[in-house]
Every structure is written in C-alpha cells, then in structure tokens.
C-alpha cells in the first residue's frame, strides 16, 4: 500500500519517505560509437513508464522500453545531445562520465546518490544534485582544482596546473566558493561546438569540451591567451553562478561580463597577459561593444554575445576602476555581493542587492553608471581619465584600413562581405571575400604607392588625393600592380584605444 502511494506522488517526495528507498533506480552506461546508451531499471513497471516519459521530455531524446522486462527502458544519448548548451553525457577519460542530471536523471530519482554501472559491470554510487552534473565512476574525492581528463599531457594537464593557482587567488579574494563540487572535467571530442568551450553547473563542476584539432595545435601562446583566461572565467562562476546566482532581473552582461573580466584580470595579474596585451584585449572589447550599442548605454542594449561578454567585461573594468579609487576593487565588490546573497537564504542577488552593496560600503561608481546610461565618446574618455585610466578616441590604423579598403573593394568586386586581416607584408583578404579583378586571397601591400600595413593613414590619404584627380588608382596585390576603379572614401570611424587600463599597479610585468 505504501509503495503504491509512493509511486503515485512526485518522485522527489521519496527522498523523505524512507520506505521508498528499498528499491532504487539503477542506471548502466554503455559507450557506443555515436555517444553512450543509458539503460535504466526502475523498481516497478509503473515507475518505469513515468520515468521514461520524464526523461524523454527533459532530454528531448527517444526512450525505448524493453519488451521482455517492463521495469527496463533505455535511451541513446548522441555525442552532440545537449540541454541548454550542456552536453547530456561527456566522457572525461578513464571510464569517467559527466551525466547531466536535469536531462537524464530527473530529480536524481529523489535521492542523494544514484547507482551507475559501466557496460554491465559492477555499479558504484555517485552523488547526485538535481541541477548539476553527476560524475560517474569517480574513484576518489577530488581536491579543488583536480582535473579529470583523458590524459595528463596536453590540455588537461595544463588546465590542472592553472586551476590550482587560480583557485587559490580567487579564494583569497572572494572567500570559499559556495558550491559543493570541486571537479573539473575535460572531454576531448570532435563534437565540441568550437575549438574549446566550457560550462559550469549549479554545484561548481566545470566541463571543458575540446576538439582534438585544438588540442593538437596547443602551444604556449594558445594556453596563456585562450585556455587559461577561459578557465579563470569558468572558475569565477563558482562564486557568481553556483549556489549563489543572479535573479531574473539581473542582465546577463552583469555576471558573464564579470567572469570575462576576471578571466583577463587574473591572467594579467599572473603574467599570462602583459599590460599592453590586456589593454589591447580590453580596447577591442570596448570597440566591439560601442559598435553594437552606439551612444545608447549598455542598459538599453539587448542580449547577445557582444553585450554579455564584451560590453559586460568593459562594465566590470570600469566598476573596478571606480572602486580602486576608493580603496576597494572588483573582488571586494563581488565578495560583498556573494556573501549578501548567501546570507539571504535564497542564494539570489538582484539589482537592489547590487545597489545596496555599493551604498552600504560607501562606494560610488560614476564611470560605471555613465557606461550603463550612455553618452558621447568624449565624456567616456574624460570619465576614464578621472577614474585613473587613460583612453583616447581616434582613428587608429585599423580604422583607416577599413575606411580605405571597404569602399574600394565594394566598387571593384561583388562580394557579400569584404573581410581582411592585417599581416606585416600587407593586408590579406578573407577566403569569403570574392573579387574577380584580384587574385584569390590577395595580399595587398601598397595602395597609391604607400605601404598599407606600415602606414594605413598615409595610404588612405594618398588614395583620396589620387581619386580627387583620377578615376583609377593602382594597388600592389601579390606583388603585381592592379588598376582599380576609384571610390568615394569617407572619413574613418574613430575607435577607442586604451593607453593605460589603470591596472598596472602590482601586476607582473612581461610574459
Ligand atoms: Zn560564463
């Protein structure tokens, strides 16, 4: 009788009803060529029907009932199967797997632990949280910063070395991380959405997905400018998105931008970025953001990669500058906000909490607020100067190259886009820039007699002078002169350049 009542109510209730614990759901993992198959055995047929429907709905995958045993069903999880960006199942080497509970283990079947076997072999228990990854076949408790990966060489080993150091730095500044998981997993798979991506779950487990080609191309520069900044971004989420998290009223750029900024800032502090490099990175983010938002501030902007990461990181930088003028900084702000959210009992922080932290600590944030509200470039230049940094708003070499080459190519070619990248020997057109009058992937070294790589402004001015008097001008492409029709060349759009991010104090110098 009691069993019957139990299976009729939501399974989560079983967690507090001891009688339900007698026959748990067992799961068996079998790796296959396209991913992994999960075989489930429920305590009875009725539970099996309900669970299989729940798992089908949560994962979006088809569940298949076993015709010979009504308690059993299975689901094939393709390597590319995801739920809101999280891979549902990811192998991290050594027979260990990250299994995404919200898709495959609904409510952890009402338990704190789930028994999982591997390919019909002996089962072992793994701790399960409903909002997080279950890590199957993890032999021992892992210390903070420990990395599960197919091999110690390569990206896994590099991440582990950096993780231990980064966690120490973050814990020193932010206090202990609120989540329970210490695990970092690395899954090397051709199905990674790009060369390297990472996810953090609600308990703090971090999962990297790395393409084999990315791992094969690893070198010291990729590690210091891409892998380690990304790792530090994810580790910061252990504080601002794990157990403690933003409520729905907080825009994504606020917590993603803070993570992006932290990834770069720690990389600067430990010497992975030189000050000049990090200023270049910040400047590029500021310019991408400015193009996306125009003079309207970030608060008026929508959602998307540029807003969330580029604009968000710049906002965090400006807040950091404001706070540094007042003896605090980015870390002090987040430490106060995270502990306020943790104390509240809900683990959530909202806009009011952000304002309250600033007010209670007596911190003012004029540059940050200006960036959120919007304003002219001149006002931002002035405000950053007052906050201890230095930026200018002017036509940089890249702006002159765009002002010169985009109209010129558009007047002579028929391409959907006119992308190019700068090289010391000239400007090389992207593969998707199609232009019949030029050789494929043309490298343009001179325009109107001036070296376009070394003197972009000079080349732009020479082209304007030539086109004031003539209908054509000559460029050198792949070392051969090519005559092009002239075009109207508008003034270049100015962009920001960061002369001093105001972060150099106490920073290691070179790489
Ligand atoms: Zn993030």
Image (cartoon, rainbow, N blue to C red):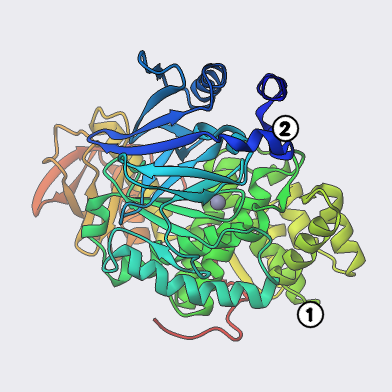
- 503 left or right, relative to 376: left
Residue 221 percent across, percent down from the top left:
32, 69
* Residue 13, disc: 2
**Residue found 39% across the figure and 37% down from its top:** 28
Q: Is residue 487 left or right of residue 113?
A: left
Residue at 78% across, 55% down:
369
Between 260 and 405, the one lying in front of the other is 260
| Mark 1 vs mark 2: in front | 2
For ligand 1, tell me if the residue under mark 2 lies within 8 Å. no
| Mark 1 crowdedness (10 Å alpha carbons): few <14, some 14-19, many ≥20 | few
As displayed, is residue 116 above or below residue 6? Answer: below
Q: Position of residue 425 (x, y in %)?
A: 19, 62
Task: Specify the quadrant that holds the C terminus.
Answer: bottom left
Question: Which residue position is annotated with label 1?
Answer: 327
Q: Position of residue 58 (x, y in %)?
A: 54, 26
Q: Element under label 2? A: helix
């Amino acid at each position: 009788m009691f069993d019957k009542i139990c299976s009729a109510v939501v399974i989560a209730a079983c967690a507090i009803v001891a009688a339900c614990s007698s026959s748990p759901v067992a799961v068996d993992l079998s790796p296959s060529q396209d991913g992994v198959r999960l075989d489930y055995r429920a305590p009875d047929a009725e539970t099996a029907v309900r669970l299989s429907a729940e798992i089908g709905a949560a994962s979006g995958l088809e569940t298949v009932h076993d015709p010979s045993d009504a308690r059993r069903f299975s689901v094939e999880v393709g390597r590319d199967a995801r739920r809101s960006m999280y891979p549902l199942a990811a192998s991290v080497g050594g027979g260990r797997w990250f299994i995404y509970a919200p898709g495959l283990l609904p409510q952890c079947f009402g338990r704190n632990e789930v028994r999982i076997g591997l390919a019909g072999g002996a089962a072992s228990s793994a701790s399960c949280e409903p909002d997080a990854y279950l890590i199957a076949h993890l032999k021992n408790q892992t210390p903070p910063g420990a990395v599960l990966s197919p091999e110690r060489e390569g990206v896994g080993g590099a991440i582990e070395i950096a993780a231990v150091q980064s966690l120490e730095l973050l814990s020193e500044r932010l206090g202990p991380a609120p989540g329970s998981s210490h695990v970092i997993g690395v899954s090397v798979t051709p199905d990674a959405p790009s060369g390297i991506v990472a996810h953090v779950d609600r308990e703090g487990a971090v999962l990297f997905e790395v393409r084999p080609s990315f791992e094969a191309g690893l070198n010291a520069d990729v590690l210091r400018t891409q892998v380690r900044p990304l790792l530090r971004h994810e580790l910061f989420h252990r504080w601002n998105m794990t157990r403690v998290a933003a409520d729905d009223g907080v825009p994504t750029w606020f917590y993603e931008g803070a993570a992006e900024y932290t990834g770069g800032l720690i990389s600067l502090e430990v010497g992975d970025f030189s000050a000049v490099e990090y200023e270049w990175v910040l400047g590029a983010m500021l310019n991408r953001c400015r193009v996306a938002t125009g003079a309207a501030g970030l608060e008026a902007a929508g959602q998307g990669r540029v807003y969330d990461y580029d604009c968000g990181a710049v906002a965090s930088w400006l807040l950091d500058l404001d706070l540094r003028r007042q003896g605090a900084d980015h870390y002090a702000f987040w430490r106060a906000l995270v502990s306020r959210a943790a104390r509240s009992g809900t683990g959530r922080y909202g806009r009011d909490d952000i304002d309250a932290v600033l007010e209670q600590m007596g911190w003012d944030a004029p540059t940050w607020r200006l960036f959120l509200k919007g304003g002219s470039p001149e006002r931002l230049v002035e405000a950053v100067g007052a906050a201890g940094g230095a930026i200018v708003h002017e036509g940089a070499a890249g702006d002159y190259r765009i002002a010169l080459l985009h109209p010129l190519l558009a007047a002579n070619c028929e391409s959907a886009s006119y992308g190019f990248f700068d090289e010391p020997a000239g400007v090389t057109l992207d593969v998707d820039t199609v232009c019949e009058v030029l050789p494929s992937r043309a490298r343009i070294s001179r325009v109107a007699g001036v070296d376009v790589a070394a003197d972009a402004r000079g080349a732009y001015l020479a082209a304007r002078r030539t086109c004031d008097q003539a209908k054509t001008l000559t460029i050198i492409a792949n070392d051969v002169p090519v005559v092009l029709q002239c075009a109207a060349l508008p003034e270049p759009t100015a962009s920001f350049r960061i002369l001093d991010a105001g972060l150099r104090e106490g920073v290691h110098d070179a790489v």
